[in-house]
Image (tube, rainbow, N blue to C red):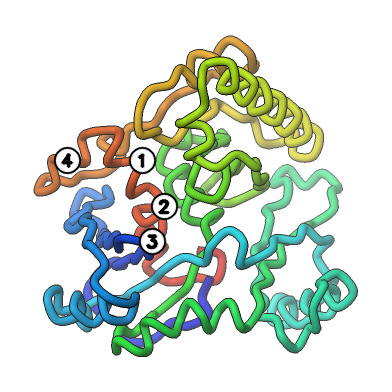
Amino acid sequence: MGWFLKGKKQPGWLAFGLYPKHVDIVHIRRAANGRPLISLCDSYRKEGTDADTLARLRKELKLDQYRCTTLLNFADYQLHSLDAPNVPSAEMKNAVRWKLKDILDYPLEQATIDVLDVPVDKSGNARNHSVYAVAARNDSIQAVIKPFNESDVALAAIDIPALAQRNIARLFEPEGRGVAMLGFYEECGKLTFTSGGELYLTRRIEIPLAQLMEANAERRNELFERIALELQRSLDNFDRQYNYVPIAKLLLAPLPQDIGLQQYLAANIYVPVETIDLGTVMDFPSIPELKHGERQAQCLQTIGAALRDDEGAAAA
């Protein structure tokens, strides 16, 4: 979200993924041909605290030259789908904030709020206009900012994982059609529906990556059944709610290894299923390890964060 946008730096964005034992750093800019160019994608072992590690990397990588961003954890924010208040766009955020007063389970004054617009039917057919309200506790925001402040690394923005996945999915959208994308991460699975580069719908699937990868054959098949059922329900719901957005395919985020998920889903849902390869939509000539799906899987969220729009709009 555009909560901390500051001065202009190097072209593109440098994104951080902070994990218990390491830090992922990705820098992406647009090449002359318009394709995203990954100029840096590396993982660094943590030494000391997050702040200690960031301070070391600030010196080694000259981080003050970049516009920096990072992601909230899945557990640190909520997305609420609301009917858009009938107010001018300049007043939308305040109006949405007021609507959240009776929805949040904590005081409104303790919340940081941003708004994502959900596009309406361009054909002009009557349809309710909806928005996503992104709500995060101020304490959660401050916890993310703290190690960056302590290490003198200036954050220009903080995003959410749903939008990082949206940033990747839109690179694979066929002209005039939408895509669903399913990714599994440390905390959970994430399903998004996008079209025209915009996020229409998102669902959380309570299956962490480790649970999926480490399951035995019987348990994995049970998880596959759960995933397929959730996908089918979500596809049906999306078709009812947004029948003016045809879904071309389901994109699967790379997994650390092939466990047969694509083949299972292809046989059990009604849209084509494709495991993405980032090399088909972006360039990384100096990072050969990114040709491998395992490395793409490890860095996918951070890559998505670094694909943030250059203008830093609130919906990016």
User: Does residue 273 appear in the picture of this structure?
Assistant: yes
The percent coordinates of residue 39 (x first, y second) are: 17, 57
User: Which label number is shown at residue 297?
Assistant: 1
Of the two numbered discs 2 and 3 on the same chain, state the one appearing first in sequence.
Answer: 3
Tell me how far mark 2 sits from mark 1, CA to CA. Answer: 8 Å
Tell me how far mark 4 sits from mark 1, CA to CA. Answer: 12 Å
Q: Which residue is drawn at 50% across and 70% down?
A: 313
* Residue kind at label 2, given as amino acid type: Gln
The answer to whether the residue labelled 4 contacts the one labelled 2, judged by CB atoms less than 8 Å apart, is: no
The percent coordinates of residue 26 (x first, y second) are: 27, 59
* Residue kind at label 1, given as amino acid type: Ala
* Residue kind at label 4, given as amino acid type: Glu
Label 4: state its secondary structure: helix
Which of the two marks, 2 or 3, is nearer to us in this view? 3
Of the two numbered discs 4 and 1 on the same chain, state the one appearing first in sequence.
Answer: 4
Direction from residue 282 to residue 220 in the image, left or right: right
The answer to whether the residue labelled 4 contacts the one labelled 1, judged by CB atoms less than 8 Å apart, is: no
Of the two numbered discs 4 and 3 on the same chain, state the one appearing first in sequence.
Answer: 3
Q: Name the residue under label 4.
A: 289
Q: Name the residue under label 3.
A: 19
Tell me how far mark 4 sits from mark 3, CA to CA. Answer: 20 Å
Residue most extreme to the right: 102
User: Which label number is shown at residue 301?
Assistant: 2
Of the two numbered discs 4 and 2 on the same chain, state the one appearing first in sequence.
Answer: 4
Direction from residue 153 to residue 312 in the image, left or right: right
The answer to whether the residue labelled 2 contacts the one labelled 3, judged by CB atoms less than 8 Å apart, is: no
The answer to whether the residue labelled 2 contacts the one labelled 1, judged by CB atoms less than 8 Å apart, is: no
Label 3: state its secondary structure: loop
Which of the two marks, 4 or 3, is nearer to us in this view? 3
Q: Which residue is drawn at 28% across and 66% down?
A: 12
Q: Which residue is drawn at 38% across and 62% down?
A: 20
